[in-house]
Image: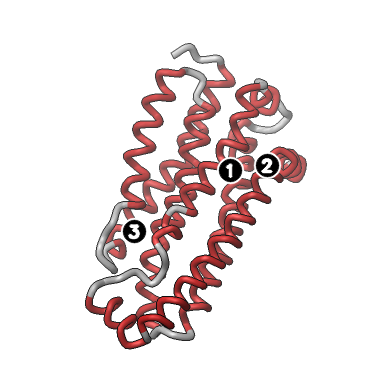
Amino acid sequence: MFSAIFYKEWIKTRRTVGLILLLLVALLVYALVQMEQTLRVNGAVQAWSAVLLKDMSLVPEVTKWFPLLTGLLLGVAQFIPEMTDKRLKLTLHLPLRESKIVFVTLLYGMAILSAAFLPMYVALYAGLSRHYAVEMLYAMTWQLLPYFEGGLACYLFTAWVCVEPVWRRRVANTLVAAAGLYLFFMDAPSGAHMTFLPCLTLILIAGLSFPFYSAARFKDGSPG
């Protein structure tokens, strides 16, 4: 049954997954070319000085928004059709516990996103490791982790909003989601997220529980 749910989600989202893959390749090409260009034009000494003294990010600003965009795209592609065609109600009546169905559905999306974020991180780390010290790469890791968690949170929040059957609650959920996502993507000095990352992880875990509540309300036909 789990494999059948995964296959159903893959059929529904395969074009979006292909788009995410294309965006990932384009982002990595752009980021790596820009980083090489910065070193070639400014020189290694000036590039290091900018990172150490001016707190310049090792990666382009656009990398910050890739996890957010992919989480939103996948969430919309996965759950809007379910609500438009009322297919989710049929799915929730399969001979399997409702919570397991929702969990496997969300697990599919989180697995797809993780499969995109991991090679993104590896490629950036490998590209930068030729020019920068390990300590700088550690700082980059701490910088990217909130963005990756934010991408997963965006996906979960999108599922939460889409599955909610009542429009006024969708609006309220959207406002809560926007406030929560701001914490993942707000600008901060290097290393500032290290102490705050556990709080972001708790928000992510909480976000995982929200779609279960909305799915239960949708199945029961809750009016408000």
Task: State which quadrant residue 172 falls in.
Answer: top left
Residue 24, percent from left and from top: 58, 59
- Identify the residue at the far front of this view: 41
Task: Give residue 74's mark.
Answer: 1
Left or right of 223, for residue 99: right
> Circle 3 — which element?
helix
Disc 2 secondary structure class: helix
Q: Are marks 1 and 2 in contact (CB under 8 Å)?
A: yes
Asked if 81 appears above or below 187 in the picture, the reply is above
Q: Position of residue 2 (x, y in %)?
A: 72, 43
Neighbour tally class for label 2: few under 14, some 14-19, many 20 plus, Cα within 10 Å? many
- Residue type for callout 1: Leu
Q: Residue furthest left?
A: 53
User: The disc labelled 2 sits on which kind of residue?
Assistant: Thr
Q: Residue at x 54, y 48 (%)?
A: 70
Callout 1: SS: helix
Taking depth in this image into account, of 31 and 79 the one nearest to the observer is 31
Residue occupying image coordinates x 30% and y 52%: 186
Q: Residues within 10 Å of mark 3 (few under 14, many from 20)?
A: some
| Placement of 123 over or under 91, stated as above or below | below
Query: Mark 3: which amino acid?
Result: Leu
Q: Nearer the viewer, residue 90 or 109?
A: 109
Q: Earlier in the sequence, mark 3 or mark 1?
A: 1
**Which residue is disc 3 drawn over?**
197
Tell me how far mark 3 sits from mark 2, CA to CA.
Answer: 30 Å
Residue lying at 52% horizontally and 35% vertically, measured from the top left: 159
Q: Is residue 203 above or below residue 214?
A: below
Question: Viewer-proximal residue, 90 or 24?
Answer: 24
Residue 13's tag is 2
